[in-house]
Amino acid sequence: MHFETLAIHAGQDPDPAYGAVMVPIYQTSTYVQKKIGETEYDYARTANPTRTALQACIAALEGGKHGLAFASGMAAIDCVLRLLRPGDHVLASNDVYGGTYRIFERVYRDYGIAFSFVEMGDLDAVRAALRSTTRMVWVETPTNPLLKIADIAGIAGVLAQAPARPLLVVDNTFASPYLQRPLALGADIVVHSATKYLGGHSDVVSGLVVLNDDALHDRLKFLQNAVGAVPGPLDCFLVLRGIKTLPLRMERHSANAMRIAAWLTAHPRVAQVLYPGLPSHPGHAIAAKQMSGFGGMISFVVKGGPAEARRVAEATRLFALAESLGGVESLVEVPAAMTHTSVANSPLAVDPALIRLSVGIEHADDLIADLAQALA
Ligand SMILES: *Cc1c(COP(=O)(O)O)cnc(C)c1O
C-alpha cells in the first residue's frame, strides 16, 4: 500500500475488545495471565498494545521489518549506542543535534568509546576517516542545524568495502519517512526523535528505532526492556495520531519552507540561507535524489552578527521563540544560544549569528509578513 494509507492504517487494526477504530490507550502496568506464562502481554515495560501498534506503524513507514519505541529521541539513540563495546569507534557527521554530541562526548566517551566527526557530504573524507575499530557510522541528513546533506547510498557503498563493515545509522528526524527512507538506501538502523515531525503537534516527547536485521532487533528489544526507557501508552497514542496527517503536513511544511527560503535569499539583511531545496545549496543534487521533498527546516545568517540574530529571533510574533521543531506551528531559535549550547567551544560550534526556523503549516504569506517585520 501507499505511504498515505500506511500512515493511517499500519499496525492499527480495529481493537479486538470493542472494535474501537482508534487504537486504545492501554493505560495498564500489568496483564492477567490465564495460567502462568499463558498471556500475550505480561508487564508494560516489556510490551504494551498501544506501543505495539506504534512500533508496527513506524516500521511500515520506514519500509523496515522491526520498530521500537522509546521515551524520547535521546532514549532511542542511547539504546542504539548500547550496541557498542569499549574500544569501538563511532564516525559521526560534523554537524549533529546538540544532545547527540553531548551523549557521545559526555556519556559514552567515559565508557571507552571513541568518537570522531567528519564532513559526511564528502565520501573520500568518510573513507579516510574510517578506522579498524569503527563499528558505527552516525549520519544526520539533513543535519541539525546547518541542513548539510549526506549521500546515504554513497556512504553505504563506502562501508560495504570496509573490512569489518560498520553499522550505518541514520537520524531521520529532519526528513521524516515521508520524505526519505534510509533503509532502502542502505542504512542498517534509522532513529527518530518522534517529538518532531512524527508527533507533529508539539505535545509529546518520543523516540523510535527501525531496522531490518533480526539479530540486531533481538538485542535492541532486549535492551529496550532491560534498560527500560519506554514510552507511556498516551505518548504512543499521540505519536500514532500525529502520523496520520504526516503526508499532508510534510507537503505543506516543504512548500512553505521553499517559499520562505527563496524570499530570505532575496532579502537585503540576510547574508546566507541554508535550505537544501535551493539550487545554490551544496547538497541540493543529492537531496533531490534521495528525498521526495526538502522539508520544513531553514537556517539563515543575518547581517549584523549575533546581537542582530538575537534581536530578529525575539522580534517575530507568529514564529514562537522556542526550542524543538516539526510542529504545525512555526518556531524560531538561535541554535548557538539555545538547542546547541552543548557544542559551544567544540569543533562543532555553531555560528552565533545563525537563526533556525521550523516552518509550520500556517499560510506562507503570514509567515513571510512576520519575518519581514522582524528583519525590519
Ligand atoms: C530533537 C532531536 C533529537 C533528540 O530527540 P528528543 O526527542 O528531544 O530526545 C535527536 N536528533 C535530532 C536530529 C533532533 O532534532
Image (cartoon, helix red, strand yellow):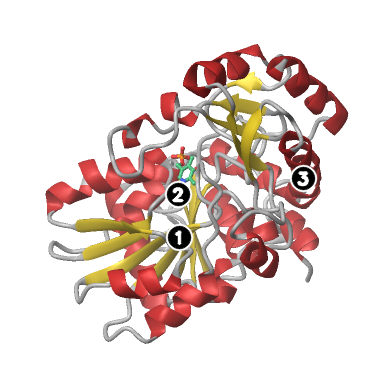
Disc 3 + disc 1, Cβ < 8 Å? no
- Is 184 above or below relative to 258? below
**Sequence-wise first label, 3 or 2:** 2
Badge number at residue 32:
2
**Sequence-wise first label, 1 or 2:** 2
User: From the image, which quarter does the C terminus lie in?
Assistant: top right
Disc 1 + disc 2, Cβ < 8 Å? yes
Disc 1 marks which amino acid? Thr
**Sequence-wise first label, 3 or 1:** 1
Q: Taking 182 as reference, is 1 left or right? A: right
Q: Taking 172 as reference, is 222 left or right? A: left
Q: Could you tell me which residue is drawn at 44 percent across and 41 percent down?
A: 72
Badge number at residue 39:
1
Tag in front: 3 or 1: 3
**Residue at which label 3 appears:** 258
Q: How many marks?
A: 3
User: From the image, which quarter does the N terminus lie in?
Assistant: bottom right
Q: Nearer the viewer, residue 202 or 40?
A: 202
User: For the residue labelled by badge 1, is the local secondary structure a helix, a strand or a loop?
Assistant: loop
Tag in front: 3 or 2: 3
Task: State the separation of the CA atoms marked 1 and 2.
Answer: 8 Å
Q: Nearer the viewer, residue 351 or 287?
A: 351
